[in-house]
Amino acid sequence: MGGTAYIDRKHAELRLDGSAIAVYANGERAGVVPLVPLGRLVLIGDLVVHTALIRRLAEHSVDVVFLSGKLQQCRGRLVGRVHRHARLRLRQYELSSGPFALECARALVVRKLAGQLALLNDAAADRPSERTTLLRAADTIASVAEKVPAAASLESLRGFEGGAAAAYFAALTTLFADSLKFDGRTRRPPRDPVNALLSLTYTLIHHEWVRECELIGFDPLIGFYHQLDYGRESLACDLTEPSRPDVDRWIWEVFRQRRFTARDFSADGERPGCYLKKASRGRYYQGYEEWIASRRPAMRAEVEALARSMLDGEDTIPIGEADAADSL
């Protein structure tokens, strides 16, 4: 499936050197990243990338994600060769509304709520002092989960999910130290260290799902639960939803183990919000790779299973053979 490299060095220059990426800083060679078995390249901040390297990355189907330096927001992607499974995309478009979409959406919400319940129950066992608050939220989510299989529309599903989310994040705040100032989920911008890492990790895992969708032949823009919205990768948003409790659990663990503290984050008056300091980003990306590596095979299996269910038993073109699939 290929590895991932992160390059976070301001004004670095990336050149193609045989079968490797050569990284130069201040005119001096600072390091080398082999192209094999590279599958993902995350570039952070202001860098110079030679066009010869861009061509080679595209030829090798290396997914390149561009993140802004301080804000750590995704600014774009470079996508090489993707799967040519036109029949799968046509089927995806046909099923994007109607009974299949609703059934798929129900399953996604059920899995997400199950993940939230598991986290709250585990946290209640770990934190007796917060047990009452955590189990009360778990009871609310369990009650919501019972209603989901009978949801008659996507709108009602979203209402159930929203109610569960309010109870869930209210309880989640009790798990983090007061010094982190986490009092609920905030996004653009994140206001505290916990939200900063949640937002960054959600961004990265979303683009993991985008890549998996593209590799098998899906159109990431056409979802089942998240409806059409200009520029939004709705299918990747769908698939990200059940992954969110796993992200939440990991973020809780890294703060509980004090791998990150409030000192690893900064905020200034120029740009509102709270962000991971550059000196701490390397530790974050290393930890993220250790956490996500074992999950990638399951992600690949999930999109393959979704494709099979949509094609109703028809054979799909195996991943890895897209370049040879000249006719469908």
Image: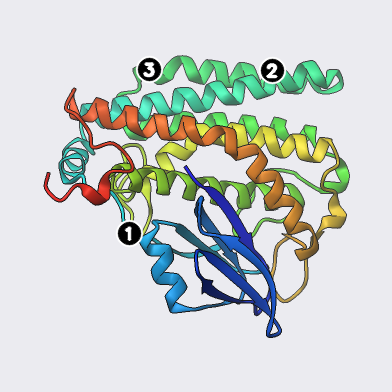
Cβ–Cβ under 8 Å for marks 2 and 1: no
Counting residues from the start of the chain, the first of labels 2 and 1 encountered is: 2
Counting residues from the start of the chain, the first of labels 1 and 3 encountered is: 3
Q: Position of residue 225 (x, y in %)?
A: 35, 37
Report the residue that reaches farthest toward the left.
327
Q: Nearer the viewer, mark 2 or mark 3?
A: 2
Q: Which residue is drawn at the image coordinates 61% and 47% (left, top)?
A: 201
Quarter of the figure that contains the C terminus: top left
Q: Which mark is residue 149?
A: 3
- Residue at the disc numbered 1: 230
Question: Which SS class for mark 2?
Answer: helix
Q: Is residue 84 visible?
A: no
Q: Which residue is drawn at the image coordinates 41% and 48% (left, top)?
A: 210
The amino acid sitting under disc 1 is Tyr
The residue lying toward the viewer, choosing from 119 and 2, is: 2
Q: Which residue is drawn at the image coordinates 53% and 24% (left, top)?
A: 113
- Residue at the disc numbered 2: 121
The amino acid sitting under disc 3 is Pro
Report the residue that reaches farthest toward the front.
18
The vertical placement of 102 against 278, above or below, is above
